[in-house]
Amino acid sequence: MTAALFLAQRLSAAVLAVAVTMHLATIIHAARAGMTAADVFSRTRGNVAFLILYGIFVLAVAVHAPIGLRNVLREWTPWRGRGLDIALAAFALLLLALGLRAALAVFLA
Amino acid sequence: MTDTDAPLAVEVWRGAAAGRFQTFQVARSANQTVLDVVTNIQRDQDPTLAYRFACRVGMCGSCAMVVNGRPRWTCRTRVAAALGAASVLRLEPLRNFTVVRDLAVDMRDFFDKWQAAKGHFEPSADPAADFAVVPPGSPQRQAADAGIECIGCGICHSACDVVAWDRDYLGPAALNRAWTLVNDVRDRGNAARMDAVSAASGCHLCHTHMSCTQFCPKGLAPTYAIAGLKRAMVARALGRKP
């Protein structure tokens, strides 16, 4: 289990390195090009490639953040065991649900 | 540095977890080591001072202490080098250990972790009948050689922040020993060893701060040994032989 979490954290970090760069580059481009929200939505609405890319981004966040947070909590608090794992699994699901909801909203906007 | 210089002021930790620093004045001498200073205090000024040493030549690993904030082997550390620009020598017991008294710490937890990491040679119930031929240039032998000179002084354990944060963490010395054995082609205990170092308190907790590598008096690099264990752990999780 430990090895699987370790591997999942590294693999998701690799995905995030690309996804965050893509995300920031998109924001900078949109801002510098003076695009309005309507301009952005006109490009993302119904764009399956956008939905897939941001779906992967959200999935990587939902995998990466809870594992890192679990390590931080283990180091800085006495919290251990099943309670911690359940809480962070719930946190992962929350991130996944909120992230996918946001990506879907932009896709359907 | 000569005997005619002003005496050296030395602050020494007295007590256990709770205690205070006591200041001594010690005559300086040429090429004086920190262990010379402690021995001087114990023999000439206060015989109740508790500390530990044996070989005095950097082999046994028993005289490690925190000297002016840094973990060091005191028998091979000259006072002048430890002082730097400071004027006072401050001696404390190793960090991350339970203090028995003064400068002596309890090493049990440290060596228990070596056992927990399966840091011992395992010949199995059916050991090889003949001598094993291990070419000195083979990658496994070289990886084992890189960490084999550990003297068990506990300096890396004292320097490690992850040990300070998580007292269950096996620590750099135990993991370094485990990695030498993972690379020992004669050993038959790797399944249990990899289970041990992949468990919740295992190698993945290392943050790669490299304090262990920075302070190891033997110039070993436990950080790289731990990185090797992480690779082996992942390879094993993916079903590959490490």
Image (cartoon, coloured by chain):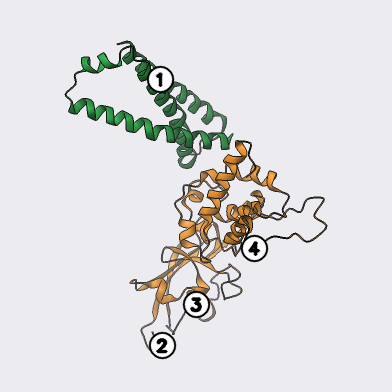
Q: Can you give x and y, in whole percent of width and height, for residue B107 in the image?
A: 60, 59
Inter-mark Cα distance, 1 to 4: 52 Å
B65 or B175, which lies in front?
B175
Q: Chain of mark 1?
A: A
Does residue B149 sit above or below B76 in this rendering?
above
For the N terminus of chain B, which image quadrant?
Answer: bottom left
B233 or B118, which lies in front?
B233
Question: Badge 4 is on which residue?
Answer: B136
For the C terminus of chain B, which image quadrant?
Answer: top right
Q: Nearer the viewer, mark 2 or mark 3?
A: 2
Q: Amino acid at mark 1?
A: Ile
Residue under disc 2 on the same chain as residue under disc 4: yes
Q: On residue B107, which mark appears?
A: none
Q: Nearer the viewer, mark 3 or mark 4?
A: 4
Inter-mark Cα distance, 3 to 4: 46 Å
Question: Badge 2 is on which residue?
Answer: B3
Q: Can you give x and y, in whole percent of width and height, for residue B203 in the image?
A: 55, 46
**Which residue appears at 50% of the width and 58% of the height?**
B158
Secondary structure of residue under mark 1: helix
Q: Is residue B17 left or right of residue A27?
A: right
Residue under disc 2 on the same chain as residue under disc 3: yes
Q: Amino acid at mark 3?
A: Ile
Residue under disc 1 on the same chain as residue under disc 3: no
Q: Colour of chain A?
A: green
Of callouts 3 and 4, which one flags the residue occurring earlier in the amino acid sequence? 3
Q: Amino acid at mark 2?
A: Asp
Inter-mark Cα distance, 2 to 1: 77 Å
**Which residue appears at 36% of the width and 14% of the height?**
A104
Q: Can you give x and y, in whole percent of width and height, for residue B230 in the image?
A: 55, 45
Q: Chain of mark 3?
A: B
Question: Badge 3 is on which residue?
Answer: B41
